[in-house]
Image: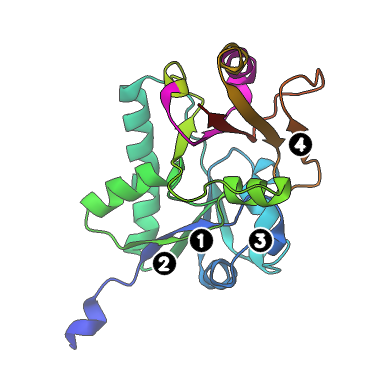
Amino acid sequence: MNSESIIKKGILYGIGVGPGNFELMTLKAVRIISECDVLILPTETKENCHAYNIAKETVKDIDDKEIICKRFLMTKDEMLLEESHRQIAGDIEKYLDEDKKVGFLTIGDPSIYSTFAYIQDILLERGKRVETISGIPSFCVAAARLGISLSNGSDEIHIISANHEIEGTAQYKGTRIYMKSGRRLKELIAYLKEEEKVRRLDIYVVANCGMENERVWYGLNDENIQSEYLTIVIVKSYS
């Protein structure tokens, strides 16, 4: 038997589908999704999965594939998270052992605050084949929507998860991008308003970037700023 015939062909792709508009999906993402046997969605139902709803606009045979929905725990208990991630990775591993191509769909890019990263690390430890298919990050599309640059010359860019500690982030120079801001938007706005008392800030809030229900706010004085799950806050500071 040829040695190549016994090499496992199963592979997991982490596929970024961009921030919201299906026209922002890469050609490679569309091709890889079309080639996959199984698709993993990090949600309870496919109808509630942003990544699936984006991809289905371009991958017309997507519902002919085996679609598996996996609920990821939202907790800061590291032990529970580890156990949950290993269980999900184990379920995916079974498909890889059957030499299937598996696509894990994510919004934006899989390398930026994505649940895919946890599964990737576990399966790489187990010697499985894993490949990342980059997607356009939401903050790049938000900047284009706003008509601003994120950096010029030697400006720094800081990408921050607003789900975690935001105290102290005012010390960062240049541009700050607060991702996952929805749950703590009120707290973040209060924090930035205090900072505005001592320095000039340009602040932009973009919710549901690229989607039909996209909302944009300039500054923090608009009382209509609403908290959405997919919210980005971009802050440009001036000393």
Is residue 56 on the magenta stretch? no
Secondary structure beneath label 2: loop
The reply to whether dot 1 and dot 2 touch (C-beta < 8 Å) is yes
Q: Earlier in the sequence, mark 4 or mark 1?
A: 1
Tell me what residue is drawn at x 75 percent, y 47 percent.
Answer: 211
The magenta segment = 171-191
Is residue 178 on the magenta stretch? yes
- The amino acid beneath tag 4 is Val
Label 3 vs label 4, nearer the camera: 4
Secondary structure beneath label 3: helix
- The amino acid beneath tag 3 is Leu
**According to the image, label 2 marks what residue?**
100
The Cα atoms of the two marked residues, 4 and 1, are separated by 36 Å
Q: Earlier in the sequence, mark 3 or mark 1?
A: 3
The Cα atoms of the two marked residues, 1 and 2, are separated by 7 Å
Tell me what residue is drawn at x 42 percent, y 47 percent.
Answer: 154
Label 4 vs label 1, nearer the camera: 4
**According to the image, label 4 marks what residue?**
216
Q: Which mark is residue 24?
A: 3
Mark 4 Cα-neighbour bin, 10 Å: few <14, some 14–19, many ≥20: some
Question: Residue lying farthest front?
Answer: 239
Image x and y of residue 38, in percent: 51, 61
**According to the image, label 1 marks what residue?**
38
